[in-house]
Amino acid sequence: MARLTEDAKARNEAAIRAAMEQILCGNLPPGHKADIKTLATLSGVTRTGFYPKKNRDGTPRPGAYQHLAEEFERRVRQLQDIGEIIDPRVAQIGRLKTQNAELRDRVTKRDEKIAQLTAFETLAISRLAAQHAEIERLRKQLAEGGNVRSLPSPASSAAPNGACS
């Protein structure tokens, strides 16, 4: 495997830094997030250069761009800690969680209102049924000619003698 020349490494580092600034400004391509994979994709550098390597004897050595990956992750954490969310998906998740909580609250309130209206409807129907039964009983009693008499209808709408007006 060929080694990177200093010139190629400098060009790659410049591309990585440009991609880093693009990501940290919140200018992410659709479907990507603020991570090393996106950094590598935008800069055109393979991801393997961002991670530590092992020598043939098994001793670890830093990746060619590991220092840039660590700087990028540190800056992302700093922005997240101060509340500047650079990943639009994180902001969308937060917004959707808030919206979900509001909708759940609205549904709970509507369920309570529906329960109240159902109880009122049941009470109103039972009262109407009782009133109807009483009216039917009185009509039946009137038709049978029992001790119920019809009151004379007033001849005029004037008040009777001695009534206060």
Image (cartoon, rainbow, N blue to C red):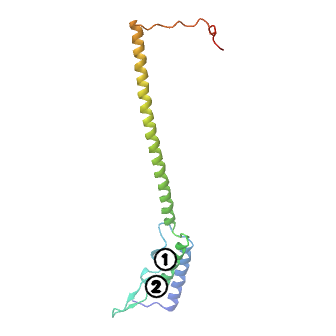
Residue type at tag 1: Leu
Q: Residue furthest right?
A: 165
- Secondary structure beneath label 1: helix
Residue 112, image x, y percentages: 45, 44
Look at mark 1 in the image and give the residue it sits on.
39
- Structural crowding at the residue carrying mark 1, measured as other residues with C-alpha within 10 Å and reported as few (<14), some (14–19) or many (≥20): many
Q: What is the distance, in whole Å, between disc 1 and disc 2 at their CAs?
A: 12 Å
Q: Which mark is residue 66?
A: 2
Residue 89, image x, y percentages: 49, 65
Residue 43 vs 131, above or below: the answer is below
Going 51% across and 64% down the picture, which residue do you hit?
91
Report the number of numbered marks. 2
Q: Which mark is residue 114?
A: none
Quarter of the picture holding the N terminus: bottom left
Nearer to the camera, 163 or 47: 163
Residue 65, image x, y percentages: 47, 85
Image position of 18 (left or right of 62): right
Q: Residue furthest left?
A: 57
* Residue 65 in view, yes or no: no
Quarter of the picture holding the C terminus: top right
Nearer to the camera, 151 or 87: 151
Residue type at tag 2: Gln
